[in-house]
Amino acid sequence: MQNAAFLLCAVTALFSVSCSRTKPEISYGFIQLVQYEAETRPLERFSFFIIAEDEDGLENLEELYLYNDREQLRWLIKSDDWITIINDGVTWIGTRSIALLNNESLPLGQYRAVLVNKGGEKSERYFSFDSQVRYPFPSLAISEDRYTVNSDWPNNRLVGYDGEGNYVSTVEIWELNGLVSELRFPSNVRTAALWAEDPDRFSSAFTNVVSVR
């Protein structure tokens, strides 16, 4: 009888460790407006990322929700679908695919993020979204090893891709025109797009890719 009681306690303790009821936490979150080049006017998409914490590890997280309660909007990002980015040792999870129908702009104001782990425990955090585009959509042209950028945005980078469209590297540019060969792109870069950013307004713009070589 004592052995049975001991076994039951051991199993219960093991279950408690592997199925923690500790709530996850959202340390920080943001929404960023991203414009993409299109034929008539730029397409607007929105990136949504958070810094998440869970005592059982990030693999214990299952669902991330984004709400605008005033406008009754809701987005669900499941763990199988969200993007994980590690920057300076900090792990971000989220998506670049928040959008409204008919390319409508996302309402400004208060949003609510809800994070749920596999045990069903959840936490939420409120934050404001006030991204605004202050500059005209930029452009990029490359011909005979020379690039020309037309941009009023504060930060400008060229994003390089290989022949199959896979991301290779990003190069910050300080001059709006110059030689591509001086940018020191890896040799497998075949196309590039301009990424212009206004960090103060959480907004950015992506041009279509153009041939580098």
Image (cartoon, rainbow, N blue to C red):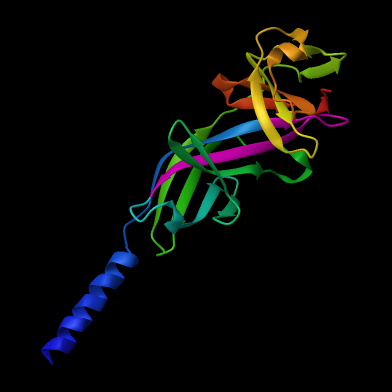
Task: Report x, y in % for residue 91.
Answer: 46, 40
Q: Is residue 111 left or right of residue 136?
A: left
Residue 102 quadrant: top right
Residue at point 84%, 17% (across, down): 141
Residue found at x 56% / y 21%: 199
Question: Residue 71: image x %, image y %?
Answer: 60, 46
Q: Residue furthest left?
A: 2
Q: Quadrant of the N terminus?
A: bottom left
Residue in view at x 77 percent, y 38 percent:
165
The answer to which of 212 and 92 lies nearer the viewer is: 212
Please count the marks in the image.
Answer: 0
127 shown above or below 62: above
**Residue 32 placement (x, y as % from top left):** 59, 32
Which of the image's four quarters has the C terminus? top right
The residue range painted magenta reads 34-53
Give the vertical position of 59 relative to 25 (above or below): below
Which of the pair 127/93 is nearer the observer? Answer: 93
Confirm whether the magenta stretch covers residue 45. yes
Which residue occupies 72% across, 34% down? 44
13 relative to 49 in the view: left or right:
left
Q: Reply yes or no: does residue 73 show up in magenta.
A: no
> Magenta stretch mostly in which secondary structure?
strand
Q: Is residue 187 visible?
A: yes
Observer-nearest residue: 138 or 190?
Answer: 190
Q: Is residue 94 left or right of residue 192?
A: left
Residue 57 percent across, percent down from the top left:
39, 53
Q: Hey, which residue is sitting farthest bottom in the picture?
A: 1
Q: Nearer the viewer, residue 153 or 90?
A: 90
Residue 105 visible in this rendered orientation of the protein? no
